[in-house]
Image (cartoon, rainbow, N blue to C red):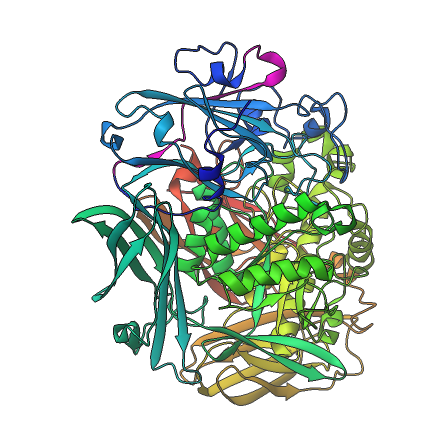
Amino acid sequence: MKCLSIITILSFFSFFSPGQNNENLLLKDHWAIQSTAKVNANGETISRVSWEPENWYAATVPSTVLGTLVDNKVFADPYYGTNIEKLPGFYRGIRKEMPEDSPFRVAWWYRTVFDLPASHKGKHTWIKFHSINYKANIWINGNLVADTSVVQGAYRLFNLDITKYVNPGNKNCLALEIFPPKGRDLTITWVDWNPTPPDRAMGIWYDVKIEATGAAAISHPHVITDLDLPSTENARLTVSAEVKNTEAKPLRGTLRGQIENIKFAQEVILEPNQTKTITFVPENYKQLVLNKPRLWWPNMAGPQNLYDLDLSFETDGKLTDVSHTRFGIREISTWMNVFDKKRTKVFQINGKNIVIRGGGYVQDMMLRPSKERIDADIAYAKHMNLNALRMEAPRGDDYLFDRCDKEGILLMVGWCCCSIWEDWKMWTSQTADVAELSWRDQIVHLRNHPSVFVWLYGSDLYPPVRFEKRYVKVLDENDNTRPYLSSATQAASEIAGYTGAYMGPYSKGYAYGPPGYWYKKQEFNTEAGPSGEQITPIESLRKMMPEKDLWPISSSWDIRLHKVFYPPMREALIRRYGKPESAEEYSMKSQVLQMEATKAMFEAYAGNKYRSSGIIYWMFNSAWPTLYWQLYDYYYAPNGAFYGAKNACEPLHIQYSYADSSVYVVNGLYKDFNGLKACLKLYDFDMKERISKEASVNIGSDGVMKILTFEKPKDLSGVYFMKLDLKEDSGKEISSNFYWLSTKGDEKADFTDMNKLSKIDLNYSVSSLKKSGEKCLLTLNVENPSSTLAFSVNPKITKDQSKDLVLPVFWDDNYFSLLPKEKRSLKVEFDLKNLDGEEAVLKIEGWNINPTSKRIR
């Protein structure tokens, strides 16, 4: 078959954004899919409106083939029990080819019929694709628009001129013959984060859009913001965009731009079919020098101010295209802190040093789109006081990046490890071309997002120089406004040199390191964490597997555990807290271990700034129900690590240092604090107070300060406790933190005596219950009336019938401890819609807490 209009297609390899108007279509619904092995028709026939498919599966787009088949109940839920192992074509591990008998080895058809507005008549109609996995022939109304020689690459973006193939004012048919990724194809990989879905995510990952323009089309709008650091009094903006003449005759027109009340324009002459980059520089357009600009800052560092750029092109008095772009004024810079023969990259935002605190982000395993899940992901990141996420491969649709811009979550974006992306010896010249084009598409598409603060064109390894040159050339030509790393490791590449980053190490960096381990780290760590085994709350265990599989540990557990990294963490749990005898006890003890280790990790990196400049926790979330590498599980149940991170990353924090057994205050804000009071109290196991010390605290902007030291009493019990409080002069609490410690030291700590704590009843009440729309906000007042420590108190909101947790949920704190007679008030917020028509129940459980519950009305 001959591919029509190939020159037109090739000249529009990259994605661009004609303006938003009511002529634009989002092709989301009314799709159907079927295997080419079951369809006896060619693309010319299938893509005609008159053709009627039989026994096809209803679909929406975005979607993968497997996701659609699961939605159609062809297969049982692969997220439950061991169902995933029963999928045809399922295989374990990372492999380059699907099994011979896999139903996903062949191409699958995606087909839809849509109405094109009559207003498209006389205009140019474009169809936009964002990530087709992996190759496709694209047909419209019986015509081949583009074939697999053009449409290939999972991270490619295409905008195709389909004017000659569509019928405005009538029904039209679009059909894609999508081919699965094969051995050397640069596709998505899940490495060891979750099982590989047997279709390897074959399908259309993101939105398919149809848009209209006149004779000239605007593409690739770009705003570069430049501050005269260290001053932020002025920002110099450089605005550019490509304009294409879509006609076979010369065109003269005006490109106009507006940013709030700032306007600018430039006359443009275009030859037939010419594309030209038009640039507005502040040297020639003085209005693009902004005085006292509203800056964009990451979460907790300042407000997330955003600006809107509107571009339009006019010719002969007619508007031919418009473009809308949101951007932020901010500047990312770095410096290398060199000490003890080590190099640590320190990131700066608007001239201010910043500790990167984040996690590794993944999408749903079947790439099912959900704005609700993205909203919850970002809300959880902010609730934990984090400021960054790492996208190993540019995962997530535009909504995710827009949300990170609005909420101040910094993004590390780059390619994935442990796959063909780093198996360069297997690359052909075509592989290299697809890699370069994919890199360019992603850079151009994402470069206006202020949240993207660094590019990574390597992960576990840096590329050979011949490929590194191509990646760097793309960056030099398309975005030189932010730093880049050749890999996520400390290795020095030939071009980029030392990264100032570090990864792992494998011995403890993905499994278990005791709290003190993290105080030895002096680096910017791109992925690490004591997270080799992270058992979820018991309610989630019951959602992901049958009751019979809960205990003893079964195959439903085994497929959700990392075979390399779970043993060290399990051994640490048993050694430190004792061997669990039930799933409930295992879950409870896991939360305690996670909190202890993760809190110390984040505290160590902030307390050691800027020898240590940041940590990306491995990982942030989960793509499917798993039992390792997560701050909250697939169902959005926070774990102990979640609250350990939340406490450690609070903006003004008092903390115990495992490195020198002293107390520090860490200020993560760009302001001074004076007249504060810190208090340390040390208790032995029977809650007898052994030490009480106070100190006045005046701490500078972004500062770290040692405030208290102490010597342990010689007759201290094997397990002892520390309570730290930081208050304003008025007595208002700023930070309060509780630690359980062992006289055997951190590495050999023995907390098994905690199993001897007496069971106690807590006093509690609910006040300030407020319901606003779909939101419920209540205050829990809880008191420990006993003379015993109330350890790892775990309040939760559940549904009265199903007993499921109400999620997502936002507690001020959780898995907290109460000293004898101590009272505490905590707020919690959740969405009423997530009750699914059931009543809400407040439950309170804990390590040594007699469970109790009450309905919330």
Residue 92 part of the magenta-drawn span: no
Residue 45 is left or right of residue 81, and the answer is: left
Within the image, what quadrant is residue 140 found in?
top left
The reply to whether residue 134 is visible in this rendering is yes
Percent x, y for residue 510?
Answer: 74, 57
Residue 241 is left or right of residue 444, and the answer is: left
Percent x, y for residue 562?
Answer: 76, 46
Residue 28 part of the magenta-drawn span: yes
Percent x, y for residue 100?
Answer: 77, 23
Q: Which of the two residues, 634 or 141, is positioned nearer the viewer here? A: 141
In the rendered view of the protein, which quadrant contains the C terminus?
A: top left
Q: Which residues are magenta?
A: 22-41
Percent x, y for residue 341?
Answer: 76, 82
Q: Is residue 347 above or below residue 68?
A: below
The reply to whether residue 453 is visible in this rendering is no
Q: Is residue 844 above or below residue 495?
A: above
Q: Which of the two residues, 352 or 432, is positioned nearer the viewer here? A: 432
The residue that appears at 58% across and 71% down in the rendered structure is 737
Residue 422 is left or right of residue 623, and the answer is: right
The residue that appears at 62% across and 78% down in the rendered structure is 607
Within the image, what quadrant is residue 389 found in?
bottom right
Q: Is residue 474 above or below residue 614?
A: above
In the rendered view of the protein, which quadrant contains the N terminus?
A: top right
**Could you tell me how many numbered marks the image carries?**
0
